[in-house]
Image: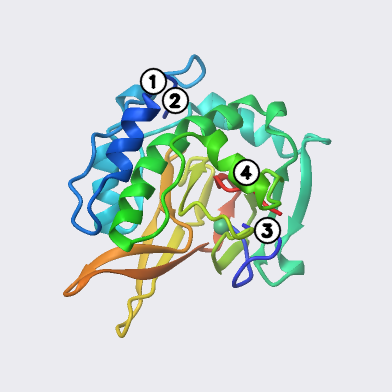
Amino acid sequence: MSEKRQPPCPDRASIDTMDSTATALSLFDLPAGEARAPIAPHVADRPDLPGLSELNWRSLYEELSRDGIAVTPPLLTAEQCAEIVGTFDRPGLFRSTVVMQRYGFGRGTYKYYADLEAVPLVRTLRESLYPPLAWMANQWAAQLNERTFPTALPGLAAECAANGQTRPTPLILRYGEGDYACLHQDVYGDVVFPLQIAVMLNQPGTDFTGGESVFVEQRPRSQSRAIVVRPDRGQGVIFPVRHRPVRGTNGFRRHPVRHGTNAVATGRRNVLGIIFHNAT
Ligand SMILES: [Fe+2]
């Protein structure tokens, strides 16, 4: 999501003990393109996010690289999903509310949290998910000969701040019947962390129908490919912000990816969007 998106429209873990020196060596000494994947980071449980240590980040990375997206096991309990849904109508929590139909983004409403200290579950989830996603992003960076990223979120936040990107980007989206999100990318400035995650907060088939998550991969000199997923409540979908590497005959090349949401047929669909770079 973005207030100034391109093109227009919206829609288990803590590495608290990760050895940043060792990780940096394994991440940044990769030979370009054909790197042997470094050791997957260990993500420790946190009191409010039990089970994070059991996530298989190598498997998720393989799924992401093969399919273009990866669906995680549940990151949040039903109670935690309800807690986050409950923030939507709490005044004072948000810095910006976007009614999508006003901007041609689709139909529905999303809100950016003003201060993540006020929503500790969202803050913890973002901080915890960043290191394994940075581990993934840095493997893609080696394949595409692109920049690498800090191994912990404060490093990325500092870089964003130096570029004038100081506003938090995590957001909650709400879609009612007939609401949908056009295909888009969530870019908020020059500093762009290449992966993001959307966490489903309702149970498909029970709380709502329709509302599938849609991804479209543009394949150079070929037809585009659509990916449609329907994560269960608590599951996260990891996907590219702008593009992903795909191996071609002459090495890796970039395939642009956009994401959106199919129209909700019945009920209400809430999603937590976690983007790691901040906004200008
Ligand atoms: Fe988005």
Q: Which residue is mark 4?
A: 170
- Above or below residue 63? Residue 128 is above
**Is the Cβ of the residue at disc 1 closer than 8 Å to that at disc 2?**
yes
Marked residue nearer the N-terminal end (2 or 3) = 2
User: Residue 94: x, y in percent?
Assistant: 77, 41
Mark 3 residue crowding within 10 angstroms, few (<14) / some (14–19) / many (20+): many
What secondary structure is found at the residue carrying circle 4?
loop
Give the camera-side residue of 50 and 265.
50
Q: Which residue is mark 3?
A: 108
Give the camera-side residue of 238 and 195.
195
Distance from disc 1 to disc 2, alpha carbons, whole Å, reads 5 Å
Mark 4 or 3, which is nearer the eye?
A: 4
Q: Which residue is mark 2?
A: 14
Marked residue nearer the N-terminal end (4 or 3) = 3
Q: Amino acid at mark 2?
A: Ser
Query: In the image, is the residue at mark 4 within 8 Å of ligand 1 by its beta carbon?
Result: no
Distance from disc 4 to disc 2, alpha carbons, whole Å, reads 17 Å
Marked residue nearer the N-terminal end (1 or 2) = 2
Q: Amino acid at mark 1?
A: Ala
**Is the Cβ of the residue at disc 2 closer than 8 Å to that at disc 3?**
no
User: Residue 4: x, y in percent?
Assistant: 69, 65
Distance from disc 2 to disc 3, alpha carbons, whole Å, reads 32 Å
Marked residue nearer the N-terminal end (4 or 2) = 2
Marked residue nearer the N-terminal end (1 or 4) = 1
Distance from disc 4 to disc 3, alpha carbons, whole Å, reads 17 Å
